[in-house]
Amino acid sequence: MNYLRRTLIIWVITLTMCATLYAQTDKQINFIENSWPEALKQAAAQNKYIFVDAYASWCGPCKMLKATTFKNKNAATFYNQNFINVALDMERGNHPQLAQQWGMRAYPTLIIFDSKGKIVLNTVGFITAKDLISFGEEALRRRKDI
């Protein structure tokens, strides 16, 4: 009886944790903050592309993306399932060098990289959740074409 009871309790706890985790991931795109090396490491381990939100703290359209587009349920589900997501403040740390290396000219710049750090696709400026999903789908199509 005790074994059955413990097993049932473990299952209930596990299911509750899974449901909570699933609900949290669908509320917004989950980003690794300011760690390009960690994003590369995770992308290689999971065989996924990397989605980069390259922003500046003073940038109005960047703030709008964070407040709206990145909190859209459909965009969150799509990006959390298909990409390693990283947000980089391009004016901090070694990010200005990355901005120069990547040829950035404006914020926000949204970039999709392969797991080795090669640019697959990019766009500049605010975009809606629908357009963000289309952007990601295009990158994944290109992956299948390779």
Image (tube, rainbow, N blue to C red):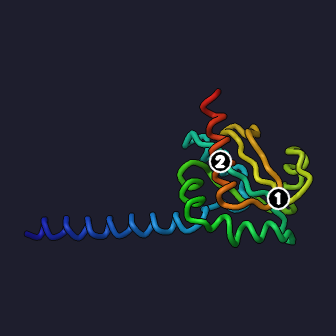
User: Which quadrant of the rendered structure holds the C terminus?
Assistant: top right
- Tell which residue pokes out farthest to the top in this image: 146
Amino acid at the residue labelled 1: Gly
Residue 136's label in the rendered image is 2
Amino acid at the residue labelled 2: Gly
Q: Residues within 10 Å of mark 2 (few under 14, many from 20)?
A: many
Tell me the residue at 35%/70% (across/down). 16
In front of the other: 108 or 15: 108
At numbered mark 2, what does the secondary structure look like: helix, strand or loop? helix
Residue 128, position as x, y percentages in the image: 70, 61
- Distance of label 2 from label 1 (alpha carbons): 15 Å
Q: Residues within 10 Å of mark 1 (few under 14, many from 20)?
A: few
Residue 7's label in the rendered image is none
Q: Is residue 58 shown above or below 54?
A: below
Residue 90, position as x, y percentages in the image: 84, 59
Question: Who comes first in sequence, dot 2 or dot 1?
Answer: 1
Tell me the residue at 60%/49% (across/down). 83
User: Which quadrant of the rendered structure holds the N terminus?
Assistant: bottom left
Q: Is residue 116 shown above or below 132?
A: above
Is 9 situated left or right of 94 in this image?
Answer: left
Q: Is residue 114 shown above or below 28?
A: above
At numbered mark 1, what does the secondary structure look like: helix, strand or loop? loop
Is 84 situated left or right of 98 in this image?
Answer: left
In front of the other: 137 or 15: 137
Would you name the residue on which mark 1 appears? 125
Tell me the residue at 68%/39% (across/down). 114
Quadrant of the image occupied by residue 107: bottom right
Quadrant of the image occupied by residue 96: bottom right
Residue 118, position as x, y percentages in the image: 75, 37
Residue 23, position as x, y percentages in the image: 46, 68
